[in-house]
């Protein structure tokens, strides 16, 4: 069984103010007390059980092999050297075999 890293995303649940104030931050992990444990094969196969797959749609114009593309837009009217970065992703996550995974909640 191959174990992967747990998610490490964080969120600021403090009040949102126009000016950033470090005294009013409330940083918390997104997945506190929850875990998804699933088996995945080393590579996709028709006769191999696996919890799920991520299917990337590469038909998006300019998309990479992972179904994503990034665009940089110059915004010099907001200040010299200012850029806006936009990213689009085209993918779908599918459960292949429910028996190959389990979701845990209320973990310590």
Image (cartoon, rainbow, N blue to C red):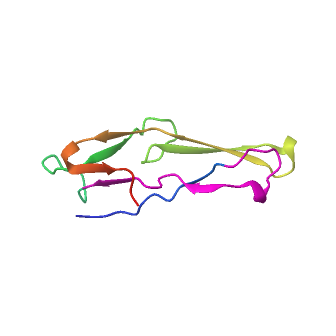
- Quarter of the image where the N terminus is located: bottom left
Determine the residue positioned at 86% across, 41% down. Answer: 77
Along the horizontal axis of the image, is 70 left or right of 96? right
Task: Give 62 or 51, whichever is nearer the viewer.
Answer: 51
Magenta stretch mostly in which secondary structure?
loop
Along the horizontal axis of the image, is 41 left or right of 55? left
Determine the residue positioned at 45% across, 57% down. Answer: 7
Q: Is residue 97 visible?
A: no
Asked where in the image residue 84 lies, by quadrant, the reply is top right
* Image position, residue 57 (x, y; %): 40, 38
Along the horizontal axis of the image, is 30 left or right of 55? right
- In the image, the segment drawn in magenta is 14-39
Task: Give 91 or 94, whichever is nearer the viewer.
Answer: 94
* Image position, residue 66 (x, y; %): 43, 48
Above/below status of 98 relative to 42: above
Determine the residue positioned at 40% across, 53% down. Answer: 34
* Image position, residue 71 (x, y; %): 63, 43
Q: Is residue 107 magenta?
A: no
- Quarter of the image where the C terminus is located: bottom left
């Amino acid at each position: 069984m191959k174990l992967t890293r747990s998610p490490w995303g964080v969120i600021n649940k403090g009040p949102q103010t126009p000016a950033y104030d470090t005294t009013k931050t409330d940083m918390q992990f997104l997945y506190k007390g929850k875990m998804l444990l699933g088996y995945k094969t080393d590579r996709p196969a028709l006769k191999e059980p696996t919890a799920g797959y991520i299917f990337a749609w590469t038909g998006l114009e300019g998309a990479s092999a992972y179904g994503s593309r990034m665009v940089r837009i110059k915004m010099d009217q907001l200040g010299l050297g200012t850029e806006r970065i936009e990213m689009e992703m085209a993918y779908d996550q599918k459960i292949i075999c429910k028996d190959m995974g389990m979701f845990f909640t209320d973990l310590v």
